[in-house]
Amino acid sequence: MSAGTSTKSKSQSRSKTVDFEPKILAFCCNWCSYAGADLAGVSRFQYNPHARIIRVMCSGRIDLGLILNAFDKGADGVLVSGCHPGDCHYITGNEKAQVTMELAGELIQTLGLEPERLKLQWISAAEGQKFAESIDEFVETIKNLGESGAKAQAQGG
């Protein structure tokens, strides 16, 4: 009986190491994207639980340091989500976010990471379903890429 139990626990532990659970940070603007995330929850839209949502006042407040720090601390992907162009509560914050994300994409490639690990998405407060779908799609993209390894690189490993 103990031999069967040890075989089962070995196969269970193997499947846990094979199953990759990505760490995703989603920076969401307070006025649109975070409200879209809230609508997704209130509407009971199911989406992947591997994304950790961080509410920011504006997507334009996300700087390169925050993105790089996320990867350095072990994030496998970073999603920045804001108001649709022309609808920013801070007038041009989402335009600033777009410029920052373009720079961040180039920078992470220089550091050896795939640009697909970074995503910019416009989601309004009324788009709860789109929020849920965006999270699911991004998690699948990151699962296909595997672990980022950025934390190991930063530690010299």
Image: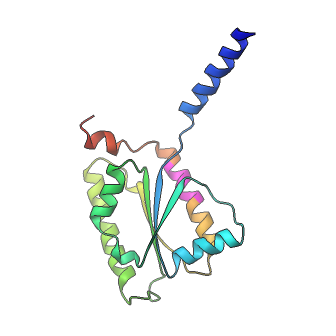
Residue visible at 62% across and 65% down in the picture = 132
Q: Is residue 62 above or below residue 125?
A: above
Residue visible at 26% across and 44% down in the picture = 154
Q: Quadrant of residue 38?
A: bottom right
Residue visible at 26% across and 40% down in the picture = 155
* Residue furthest out toward the front: 2
Q: Is residue 8 above or below residue 107?
A: above
Expressed as whole percent of the image width and height from the top left, the position of residue 50 reads 55, 52
- Left or right: residue 27 compared with residue 5: left
Expressed as whole percent of the image width and height from the top left, the position of residue 54 reads 46, 66
Q: Quadrant of residue 19?
A: top right
- Left or right: residue 3 compared with residue 18: right
Q: Is residue 63 above or below residue 147?
A: below
| Circle count | 0
- Left or right: residue 35 compared with residue 2: left
Q: Which residues are magenta?
A: 136-142
Asked if residue 82 lies in the magenta stretch, the reply is no
Examine the residues drawn in magenta and state their main secondary structure: helix
